[in-house]
Image: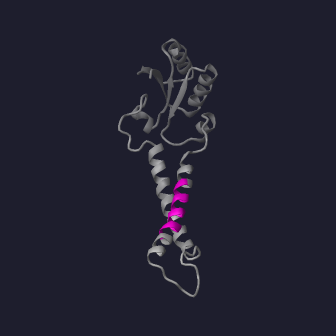
Amino acid sequence: MEGIVGVFRELDSTVEAIQALKKLRAGNIAVYTPAPRHELEHIIPHGPSIVRLYTLIGGLAGATFGYWIPIWISDYWPLVVGGKPVPSWVPYTIISFELMVLVGSLATVAGLFIHSRIPRITMTVGYDPRFSDAHFGVWVECPPDRQGDVTDTLKKHGAVEVRGEQ
């Protein structure tokens, strides 16, 4: 991945540079910020989180096992009471609910770690330690023939430093 990194001090100049880069259609844009900013969330499109599917699948699996395990056990050790069916679903609903919550929450945490790429073994291309302190960073993945336009755009909008990386 070849691209250009721009380092900015102000949020406004970062937003203007991103808008100019989107009009230029230079390539994929990644933004690094010291703290979440709603101005950047509005300008960079993102869809709904995929982690909620982990919660749904984990919850459904937990509810299924919450019913299946007690029914399976009651077939091996039946407790016949007053003509009621041995594998009755009513008393197992509490167990099913508790397992749904447990497995759903564990699946949510697993999905969060998977999609956040935690732990990050390698450093992200274009990252600078200043982006965790007080500066904003814009990484633009672009082919070599477009790097001059991207560099000019970043400098024009107030980048403190612009450099190419691979």
- From the viewer's side, name the closer residue of 58 and 17: 58
Colouring rule applied to residues: one colour
Is 88 rendered above or below residue 141?
A: below
Outermost residue, bottom side: 82
Residue 76, picture quadrant: bottom left
Q: Say left or right for 25 vs 135.
A: right
Q: Residue at x 47, y 68 (%)?
A: 69
Magenta region's main secondary structure? helix
Residue 52's x, y, as percent?
Answer: 56, 50
Residue 5's x, y, as percent?
Answer: 47, 24
Q: Say left or right for 18 vs 3.
A: right
- From the viewer's side, name the closer residue of 32 and 158: 32
Pick the quarter of the image with the N terminus: top left
In this rendering, the count of numbered labels is: 0
Outermost residue, top side: 145
Residue 35's x, y, as percent?
Answer: 50, 42
Residue 146's x, y, as percent?
Answer: 53, 14
- From the viewer's side, name the closer residue of 25 and 21: 25
Residue 126 within the magenta-colored segment of the rendering? no
Q: Residue at x 55, y 22 (%)?
A: 27
Residue 152, picture quadrant: top right
Is 77 rendered above or below residue 96?
A: below
Range of residues picked out in magenta: 57-69
Is 117 rendered above or below residue 97?
A: above
Q: Residue at x 59, y 23 (%)?
A: 21
Pick the quarter of the image with the C terminus: top left
